[in-house]
Image: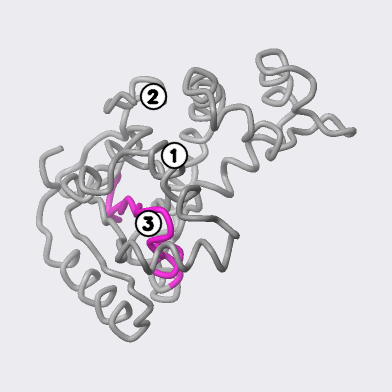
Amino acid sequence: MPESPSTIGEPFAPTTRWKHGSLPVIGLTGAVGGGKSAAAALLRERGAVVIDADAVGHEVLRRPEIAQRLADRFGSGILTADQTVDRRALGRIVFADPAGRRDLEAVVHPPMFEEFQRIVAESERCGEGPMIVLDAAILLESGWDHACDLVVFVDAPKEVRLDRVRRSRGWSAEELDAREAAQWPVERKKARADRVLVNDDDLAKLTLSVDRLIAWIDQVETVPPQ
């Protein structure tokens, strides 16, 4: 996928320290099954405003005009009886079709990015929390990292990640590999991150890592070059 945010609008206007004002925007991503949701929860407990990209995406798919555009592209079979998008049906189509996935993203990513902008602006206006966290599995693939001040990647050993997705989603090793193949390689993502957190099911260690991350962010004086 392209590494620029050209399909989702321009990044927020820069300021002297953070790109968006007084609060840093942290892009949170991770390996499939890496446990970034646990890291996001710890950051939320510490006052961060967490933007859940999946939840925003689901809200966008409920919009009638979006549902109609997707039905025009993928057929009426992706709609439920009440004319909303059946995400499972849509997912079955685009997961096996890279061109279809790109067409889907061209429809849903711009309004998702607009919602991210709205939440960031509102959080800045209200002065909420120590930071804003954009929790997004495809943060880098979508180019959304260009709107973030820092990128944090949550990782775990492959065997831990496989055990998690087996228990939580019923996935096999082959399913995990297929899902990972639809995203950037883990090592490529880690190389683009400013910090890497390891979440190997030791909550105390993850909690310490999150607290150290917050302390480190407090010491960052300028936005690292993108």
Q: Quadrant of the C terminus?
A: top left
Distance, label 3 to label 1, CA atoms, is: 11 Å
Q: Mark 1 and 2 residues: CB-CB less than 8 Å, in contact?
A: yes
How far from the left and from the top, in percent, is residue 161? 40, 63
N-terminal label among 3 and 1: 1
How far from the left and from the top, in percent, is residue 113? 46, 34
Specify whether 140 is left or right of 216.
right
Q: Amino acid at mark 3?
A: Ile
Q: Quadrant of residue 203?
A: bottom left
| Direction bottom: furthest residue | 204
Q: Residues within 10 Å of mark 1 (few under 14, many from 20)?
A: some
Residue, disc 2 = 9
Q: Amino acid at mark 1?
A: Gln
Closer-to-camera residue (31/38): 31
| Direction right: furthest residue | 81
Q: Residue at x 66, y 34 (%)?
A: 61
The magenta stretch spans which residues? 20-41
Residue, disc 3 = 132
- Up the image or down, 44 lies above or below 61; here it is below
Q: Secondary structure at mark 3?
A: strand
Q: Residue at x 19, y 73 (%)?
A: 215
Distance, label 3 to label 2, CA atoms, is: 19 Å
